[in-house]
Amino acid sequence: MGGLPLGFNPRLLPPVWSHHMTRQQDPVVNSSFREAIVVVSIWLIAMTWTITVCYRMGYNRPVEELKFVYGFPDWIFWGIVAPWCVCTVISCLFSALLFRDGHLGEDVENADDLGLGG
């Protein structure tokens, strides 16, 4: 059973998607999925860059070759500070230019209409 409680039946759970829409038809889900792919891709590129640059410039290097950029050792500046600044700019541009609001349906006037008992 792999850690599932006794008597747990996943078929009894409510469906995640509306029975009228599949994942391919729901524009909000499609947009969110596309945005998540971009964010994860940016993170993977930044992580790969950081690990590679910090390893190659920071290890097995004589102290005499150490240079400073804006007060940081060069391997920290090019491996951590620079990609952090670049990712901040890319994230701001991406969220300002490419994120979209999707129509989520009609707003509920009364919270009791949700059937939550509140």
Image (cartoon, rainbow, N blue to C red):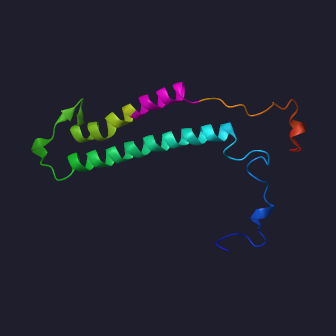
Is 84 on the left or on the right of 102, as rendered?
A: left
Q: Residue at x 38, y 46 (%)?
A: 47
Q: Compared with residue 15, is residue 46 higher up or lower down, i.e. above or below?
A: above
* Percent of width and height locating residue 68: 19, 34
Residue 69 place in picture, x, y as percent: 22, 32
Left or right of residue 6, residue 57 in this image: left
Name the image quarter holding the N terminus. bottom right
Q: Is residue 103 left or right of residue 59?
A: right
The rendered magenta stretch, by its main secondary structure, is classed as helix
Quadrant assignment, res 113: top right
**Looking at the image, residue 60 lies above or below residue 81:** below
Horizontal side of residue 28 vs 90, given as left or right: right
Q: Residue at x 61, y 29 (%)?
A: 100
Q: Which residues are magenta?
A: 87-99
Q: Residue furthest left?
A: 64
Q: Quadrant of the C terminus?
A: top right
Could you tell me which residue is drawn at 77 percent across and 53 percent down? 15
Residue at position x 22%, y 38% from top?
73
Q: Position of residue 42 (x, y in %)?
A: 43, 40
Q: Is residue 9 magenta?
A: no
Image location of residue 29, percent across then percent down: 65, 41
**Hey, which quadrant is residue 116 in on the image?**
top right
